[in-house]
Image: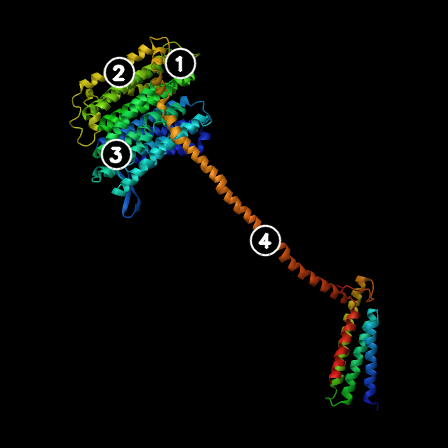
Amino acid sequence: MVKFAHLIPIFPFLAFAILILFGRKLKRSSAIISIAASLISLLIVILTFHGLLKGQGSYKLFDWLVFNGITLRVGVIVDPLTCTMLLVVATIGSLIQVYSIGYMSDDPRFSRFFAYMSLFMASMLGLLLADNFVTLYMFWEGVGLCSYLLISFWFEKASAAKAGMKAFITTRIGDAGLLLGIFLLFFSTHDLSFSGLSAITGHPALYTTAALLIFCGAIGKSAQFPLHVWLPDAMEGPTPVSALIHAATMVAAGVYLVARCFALFFTHQPALVCVAYIGAITAIMAASIATVNNDIKRVLAYSTISQLGLMMIGLGVGGYSASTFHLVTHAFFKALLFLCAGSIIHSVHTQEINKMGGIFHKMKITGTAFIIASLAISGVPPFSGFWSKDEIMTEILRSGHPMIFIAATITNLLTAFYMFRLIFLVLFGKPRSELHPHESPKTMAIPLIILSIFAIFMGLPGSPLMNNVFQRFIYFGAEHTALSSNPDHFVMGISVIVAFLGIGIAYALYMLNKEILSKSIRNRFTGLYDLVYNKYYVDELYEFLFIRPCARLSKAFSGFDLKVIDGAVNASASMVVFLSKAKAWIDSNIVDGTVNMIARAVGMLSGELRKMQTGYIQSYLLTAFMGLILILLLKIIGG
Amino acid sequence: MIPQNHFLILSAILFAIGIFGVLTRKNAIGILMSIELILNAANINLITFNKFQKTPDGLGQIFALFVIAIAAVSAVIGLALVISIYRNAKTILVTKINLMKW
């Protein structure tokens, strides 16, 4: 059995290295390197997938960090979940990079963009292949870094730079939880591999805490309540980034993490219930915000948050395969939605849906793709979203959480509503400002077409029409066998009714009314409208609760630093200066004085003595002669 | 027979003249000549004591011959120095030559 799965992230990483080093010289061809690397990875993913179907499994690469008899085995995981995710990431990643050629064509940092994209691909693929928490965490931070770099890619814009920081710091809060969870697991089990999770027994409170801490990481990464605030702002980045990182892949990493640790969550039900409720709150809250937002990308961002919430619900009620299924279908149609939005923005140069309108007849390909994706996300059969959402709804009903079922149903209603609100406002009606829409270049249109095909048909493998192939492929434990062999017509009926109801309301409000949003409704629900329009004031709450106190604390510390610490430093410095001055005085006056005095005394003495040196030989001789006579006289007297 | 004292007195007079010359002459050559007088005073003493005292036969005379030879050598060196000084200072008056002054 050939083991080559670990090669998957290497090619994009090489592309990153080449582009970051030689990007300036490569210019336009950097896109080709980046895309080629992604395509090679995609090829290896397909080979790995083929190997998996033939029975190949995970394997160990090497031992790392051996201490105290505990060895960290680094390997790659090759199982249905990883392989499916790898396929999704590699496919969408390649398509979006092709799309970026057109979208980023005028950007001065063209090759830098592709370098970051390649680094992201490498990290994301590595994250999916990690078979233990340490390597997972490594790549987890890697994708976080790429997210930061790409959100603030246009860092000349202050809002983009700020959004990047916000995303980084907000996800960091979740990551801190994840890290603590990893520590907790390590100290209690001495095993960080995912395969060891199913063997965990005892200490329910301890392991529930660990599971919740790991879920914190997922909350941050997947923008779940209460850490959802960064994702809408992340839309400041280039649209292909929003599509790839903040819709299809990276934000799904949180869902993937919970799915990967599902063994731990499943055996500790309180944590699982918590996942479900967080998901429900997120789903309904984000969906409601999406109904009133006026920025096309932000609506889609809230939609992403909402759908991720739905996936969390799916996991929380035990629907492992349903949730993964929705993750896959969502990745395709949400990437498609973002790429369509990017195509529209590229063409009309605005993101305000109030200024758009009636651009369908000018942008047929984009418009059609947008409608297909919207039908998919709204849950209209037979598009992909219908089947995956239906699976999740069935799971919720089976698990017996009526509140969550109601919340999810309302979310679905809102989803259909806001998606078709977008369609009616953007694609149809009359233009509400000077617009000159035109179809985007081929590099952008072709990925749209391919993704549209996926958005239509991706649901079939998980549908009863194909005997739930997908669920039989990805399942958790034995739990699946009893599941969904016969479709639940009650749930399907509700889903379809809800979807069409949402579309109908949108049609009534935005197509039949001449006003953008009928004033009467807005006036009737002023309070509620303002609440939702301002995103439930979560940002303001954080501003008030954390950011301002933090800023104030920082200022206080800064003041303390400036006054007390700097004061102490300055005082000690001036004391040293004073002491030095005193020493200098002593040195120049007393020590030098002594030395000078000795020198002067010697000088004076020698000044007198030198007068004896006349330079006349005869005077010297005379002296010598006198001396001789003196000695002789002494001799004579002495006898 | 001339008594010993006469020789010694002659020698002392010669020595005194030599010393006087050395200390008073301004001319370097005069000084050199005076030194010769001093040396010759010493030679007279040597021969006198060789004659009148009980010394091995001829020792004083040999010593005197040595002194004459050395005096010749010293005169040569002295004259060479004087010539050298003259070339540099255009004078041989020792009062003008005060290079050794501080």
Give the foreground label among 3 and 4: 4
Image coordinates for residue A609, horizontal then vertical, percent: 74, 66
What residue sits 74% from the left and 81% below the top?
A634
Distance between mark 3 and mark 4 Cα atoms: 70 Å
Chain of the residue displaying label 2: A
Q: Earlier in the sequence, mark 3 or mark 4?
A: 3
For the residue carrying disc 4, how many other residues have a C-alpha within 10 Å: few (<14), some (14-19), or many (20+)?
Answer: few
Labels 3 and 2 positioned on one and the same chain: yes
Q: Earlier in the sequence, mark 1 or mark 3?
A: 3
Three-letter code for the amino acid on which mark 3 is drawn: Cys
From where the camera sits, is residue A22 visible?
yes
Which residue is labeled 2 in the image?
Answer: A499
Q: Secondary structure at mark 1?
A: loop
Distance between mark 2 and mark 4 Cα atoms: 89 Å
Which residue is labeled 4 in the image?
Answer: A583
Image coordinates for residue A508, horizontal then vertical, percent: 31, 10
The residue closer to the viewer here, A489 or A328, is: A489
Viewed as shown, does residue B100 lie left or right of A434? right
Q: Are marks 1 and 3 in contact (CB under 8 Å)?
A: no
Image coordinates for residue A509, horizontal then vertical, percent: 33, 11
Residue A356 numbered mark, or none: 1
Which residue is labeled 3 in the image?
Answer: A261
The residue closer to the viewer here, A304 or A369, is: A304
